[in-house]
Image (cartoon, helix red, strand yellow):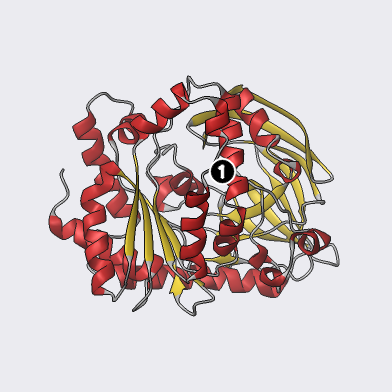
Amino acid sequence: MVPTKEQLSKYAHLTIKMGVNVQKGQALLINAPIEARQFVHHLVEEAYEAGSEDVQVNWTDEVLTKKRYDHEPLSVLEHVPDWVVERQMTHAKNGGAVLNIHAPNPDLLEDVDAERVAKASKARSEALKDFKKYIINDKIQWSIVSVPTEAWAKKIYDTDDADKAVEDLWKRIFQIVRVDQDDPIQAWKDHNETLFHIRDYLNDKQYDALEYSSEYVDLTVKLPENHVWAGGGAVAETGASFNPNMPTEEVFTAPDFRGVNGTVQNTKPLNYNGNLIDDFKLTFKDGEVVEYEASKGEETLKHLLDSDEGAKYLGEIALVPHSSPISQSELVFFNTLYDENASCHLALGSAYPTNVEGGEKLEDEELKEKGINTSLIHEDFMVGSADLNVYGVTKDGDKEPIIKDGEWAIKGA
């Protein structure tokens, strides 16, 4: 299936109106792979129709990315030009919205020295850390969506038939993001309301800790005082509502990074910087990863954990029912945007400051005093399964079910 103009237009309309929700007179920056050009053309048209001004597109090309890693000296890979930082910062300071089209080739950098990739990634994270604050504090609207690319689709379906793989992935994406419904925008409003119900329930409870147990997880996670659960749509400082991730099936908050103890094994592969990490196990003590192992990508995992001090601690805990549409597809997407919404997950690295009351106004050291982790990285990995149980522990020590056998145990969820 090659998507029709009507289908692409419908997806673009949903993305612009419910995803990034660009406002009249607002600038928009779109980051996209060149394979998404047809979809981007529709996005730009929809953005202008919504009243956006100064719509810019930053194109990426995985072939050129790979050649850069193969041939550039490390000194160049570790250098982020001032104009790259200035472009992003100027856009954010002026209140512009950001839309990312995320469709990575999971195996793009598998034969590149992991250290080169890690150092280049760290350099970019350090250079853009101030821009990142605009995103993680919801100062501006931002959103992430995906479209099929040949390499990604072939990896998912394990086939060399690129046309069939791309066709099947388009169908799956349209289904998962509700584009196949008569009124996708209303469908997303209804979906957000369900997530808001769960979010509000958990915020009212203010559990002291969560306890996870399954074949893969034996973990206790302390929660900070005045933590804030989020999920579904968000509201930026601009006053506009938006959906940061499409799809999204999660509610999430920040743990007290000092109070995580136990072991976890991944239940889906982690695609990190063009390399896959799989069949890995992490052991936490007083929040820190003190032991780790992986049957695939262990060197990449080591570099991830060594990114900075905060990379060995958790910054997010997210709850997702095992019956989510992504999980029911029975596909591994090798794309965190999709795989994280198939499964309960955790994130190494930085927390979202908005996951604690008033966090968006605090500096890094003030956040750490409240148990909110800071780091250059934020990497989600999946731990959910059909046998996962998650209990909320009250301040009195009582345990109440939140997830039971992989599904919500909350009434009305």
Q: Looking at the image, is 217 positioned above or below residue 28?
A: above
Please say whether residue 412 is visible from this viewpoint: no
Disc 1 on helix, strand or loop?
A: helix
Q: Position of residue 7 (x, y in %)?
A: 18, 57
Q: Position of residue 413 (x, y in %)?
A: 52, 67
Q: Nearer the viewer, residue 404 or 153?
A: 153
Q: Nearer the viewer, residue 209 or 363?
A: 363
Image quarter of residue 245: bottom left
Q: Residue at x 69, y 72 (%)?
A: 361
Q: Is residue 21 visible?
A: yes
Q: Going 39% across and 26% down the picture, which residue do you hit?
A: 67
Q: Is residue 339 left or right of residue 60?
A: right
User: For the residue marked with disc 1, what is the amino acid?
Assistant: Arg
Judge by depth and name the residue closer to the eye, 393 or 181. Answer: 181
Q: Position of residue 33 (x, y in %)?
A: 33, 44
- How many residues crowd mark 1 within 10 Å: few (<14), some (14–19), many (20+)? some
Height in image: 299 above or below 105? above
Could you tell whether 57 is left or right of 371 in the image?
left
Q: Quadrant of the N terminus?
A: top left
Horizontal side of residue 52 vs 402, given as left or right: left
**Residue on which disc 1 sits:** 124
Nearer to the camera, 281 or 54: 54
Q: Is residue 111 above or below residue 248?
A: above
Q: Position of residue 47 (x, y in %)?
A: 28, 68
- Image quadrant in which you'd find residue 29: bottom left
**What is the residue that sits farthest to the front in this orientation?**
82
Q: Is residue 261 above or below residue 404?
A: above
Q: How many marks?
A: 1
Quarter assignment of residue 10: bottom left
